[in-house]
Amino acid sequence: MDANLAAIAPVASGPAFLPPPSAAAPADASAPGAFARLLQHEVGALDDTLKVAEAGMRDLAADKPVELHDVMIGLERARISVQTFVQVRNKLVEAFQDLMRMQL
């Protein structure tokens, strides 16, 4: 039984090509440029997620020893990140359009 648990232990740490969850965004939201820094941080995190998914696909295509489920998890994370980013962009565009339609 202990031998089986020892074989599972390396899996618990997670695959090598999945990034850790992104660090918290800048804490001072009232500082000038905080929103721009937040967007830059999140775009960078999105880019990192996409690079990880692409590396996993490249390794799988090159017949390197990678687990298929790890590659699929990386791809799903990238897909969800892109979908979330697109929805946030859509909300920002909608809010900007609402501001532009306001009468002064």
Image (tube, rainbow, N blue to C red):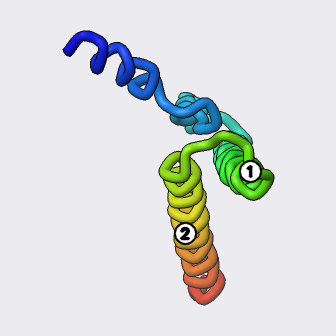
Q: Do the residues labelled 2 and 1 touch (CB within 8 Å)?
A: no
Residue 92 screen position, x and y as percent: 59, 70
Q: Which residue ends up furthest to the left in the rendered image? A: 1
Mark identifier at residue 83 = 2
Sequence-first disc among 2 and 1 = 1
Pair 2/1: label in front: 1
- In this picture, is 51 found above or below 12? below
Residue 72 placement, left or right of 41: left
Write down the quadrant of residue 65 in the picture.
Answer: top right
Q: Looking at the image, which residue is at 54% across and 52% down?
A: 68
CA gap, disc 2 to disc 1?
A: 29 Å
At 53% from the left and 72% from the top, the residue drawn is 87
The percent position of residue 73, horizontal first and vertical second, equals 50, 52
Residue at x-position 35% and y-position 14%: 6
Label 1 sits on residue: 63
For residue 14, side relative to residue 86 (left or right): left
Please give the count of numbered marks on the rendered protein.
Answer: 2
